[in-house]
Image (cartoon, grey):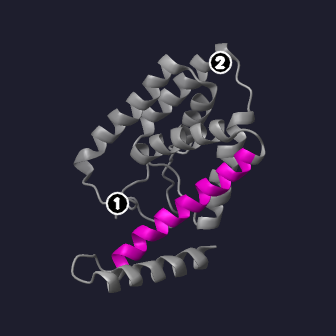
Amino acid sequence: MKRMIEALATRIAVKLKEANPKDTASVEVMRYALIGILHNAITFSAAFLIGLLLGKLLATFLAAVSFMALRFVSGGYHFKTPLSCFIFSTIIFIAIPFIPLQSDSYWIVNTISLALTAIFAPSNIKEHIQVSEKYFPLFKLISVVIVVINYFWLNPVITLALFAQSVTLIYIKRKEVGTNENE
């Protein structure tokens, strides 16, 4: 899958550069951006197709949009391979609409999401975005606001999607064996 996406991104980037060499970024820059776009498009398409087949298209869409809205500003764990990310994301998006959540649990689950977001967001985003760290407090604030807004909606799909994303924020830095802390 990774090679397929990279090859397609390269072909598209080359065609875009050939069509407008003056006003486009380098092939490498466009290729990098296109890999992300294609990866997300394939993941969403697979999830939406399965959601449609299972009769939960709208709920799958709501789960995906909620998860990704929070992820965009909060960051989170990144899998080592695109295939792992694809599988995890697709399963999360299609599973959430089928997970029962009692109405009295909304507050508890949302509060856990809020706590995780307030503590850990933004998480693991330095290598994945081109934004100055001075904006990270704003990212945290926006992340917290997204979760707080759900206290007014208390939708089970949104609640579970935000919870799933907030769990990916947990990052505990491990000390590598054989390293000196003073270095």
Q: Is residue 177 visible?
A: no
Residue 10 included in the magenta stretch of the image: no
Decide which of 26, 52 is in the foreground and name it: 52
Residue visible at 26% across and 84% down in the picture: 21
Residue 10 x %, y % = 46, 81
Decide which of 168, 61 is in the foreground and name it: 61
Q: Amino acid at mark 2?
A: Ser
| Location of residue 156 with respect to 117 vertically, above or below | above
Q: What span is colored magenta in the figure?
A: 28-52
Q: Which of pointers 1 and 2 lies earlier in the amino acid sequence?
A: 2
Which of pointers 1 and 2 indicates the residue nearer the eye?
2
Residue 102 x %, y % = 71, 18
| Location of residue 5 with respect to 105 vertically, above or below | below
Residue 57 x %, y % = 67, 41
Q: Quadrant of residue 61?
A: top right
- SS at mark 2 in the image: helix
Apparent side of residue 14 relative to residue 116 in the rendered image (left or right): left
* Contact? badges 1 and 2 (CB < 8 Å): no
Residue visible at 47% across and 45% down in the picture: 71
Apparent side of residue 26 relative to residue 180 in the rendered image (left or right): left
Residue 15 x %, y % = 40, 83
Q: Amino acid at mark 1?
A: Asn
Residue of label 2: 105
Apparent side of residue 50 relative to residue 158 in the rendered image (left or right): right
Give the quadrant of the N terminus. Answer: bottom right
Apparent side of residue 131 relative to residue 158 in the rendered image (left or right): left
Q: Quadrant of residue 157?
A: top right
Residue of label 1: 182
Q: Residue furthest right?
A: 54
Decide which of 159, 120 is in the foreground and name it: 159
Which is the main secondary structure of the residues drawn in magenta? helix
Residue visible at 46% across and 28% down in the picture: 147
